[in-house]
Amino acid sequence: MSGVRLAHDDRGEVAQLHGLGIQRFGDLYYAYGENKVKGNLFQGVVCYTSPDLQDWTNRGIVLPVRDEGLLAADTIAERPKVLRCPSTGEYVMYVHAERHDYSYAHVAVAVADDPLGPFRFLFSMQPFGNISRDIGVFQDEGGEGYLLSEDREHGTHIYRLSADYHSVVEDVVCLKGTDYAFGYESPTMIRHEGLYYWFGSQLTGWDCNDNMFATAPAIEGPWSDWRPFTPEGSRTFDSQCDLVLPLPDGQFLYIGDRWNPDDLGNSPTLWLPIRIGGGNASLEWHDEWHYEA
Ligand code: GAL
């Protein structure tokens, strides 16, 4: 796999794998991306499937543009993340839902019986009254679901989801960065060998910065200090973390956006192995690397 790439789908078009969420359901990876072909305004969430994270089949728009209100064509929706709820079998999508000027700061919830949708918009919320900007999701080994959500005022929260994954039932933890006034955004989390690893980026909009991670033995903490996982000043190899994905061969895949604000739909993505263990995380640059998907 190439370290940085602009993946093309089976139609020969640039795959809109921006701000993406990936899950493996059955034999396939399902990637849900921000469709940025015509710029930043909402054009529907698009889904691609792949057996190997290399070749992507375009499965079309799975969360359509609504006629009016939230998720309409004059709004913004970012970081679509899907989980399969173990207690209902339903597929639940969380997505950051905004007005065109980023003044709304809600998270929208949509559901489907099939991972290819169509996802039905249920409602949007500000969890426990907190604003919600960049989001991520996490499913623990026991099946509990979590929503990670950046709230400018208090920090970044991890909320526990209800049994049906439709809503939040507990504000488990809320953290600001180390020597940093805010919580980190573009949050993503994994669990490995009894430790939780939480990743996020500083708040610099489309610009890149040194992204950070922290670890804890339990979601409620205690959490370590935050520190970078790439050489300081490398700006995470000019990317913003999006996902850290466990691979079947034991490696972890880092996926990060290298945003191109003037042409968002052609923003390339970094796909790199990230070494994780013993409380450390380290991302190294590779032009090409091999993995078992
Ligand atoms: C970033 C965020 C992106 C997008 C961008 C807009 O901070 O991570 O998802 O919202 O700002 O400027």
Image (tube, rainbow, N blue to C red):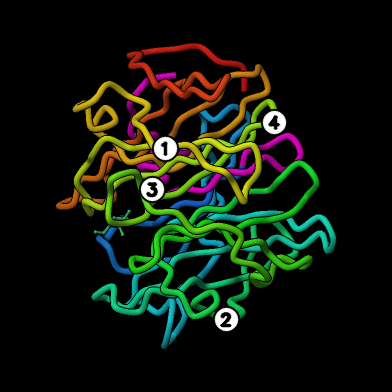
Nearer to us: label 4 or label 1: 1
Between the C-alphas of marks 2 and 4, the distance is 34 Å
Q: Which residues are magenta?
A: 1-29
Q: Indicate which disc, 2 or 4, sits on the residue closer to the N terminus.
A: 2
Q: Secondary structure at mark 1?
A: loop
The verdict on label 4 being within 8 Å of ligand 1 is no
The circle on residue 18 is 3
Residue beneath the point at 33% across and 65% down: 152
Between the C-alphas of marks 2 and 1, the distance is 35 Å
Give percent across and percent down for residue 11. Answer: 44, 42
Out of 144 and 288, give the one closest to the viewer: 144
Name the quarter where the C terminus is drawn: top right
Residue 45 appears left or right of 237: right
Give percent across and percent down for residue 161. Answer: 68, 64
Q: Is residue 42 visible?
A: no
The amino acid type of the residue labelled 1 equals Asp
Nearer to us: label 2 or label 1: 1
Q: Secondary structure at mark 2?
A: strand
Between the C-alphas of marks 3 and 4, the distance is 30 Å
Q: Is residue 64 magenta?
A: no
Between the C-alphas of marks 4 and 1, the distance is 18 Å
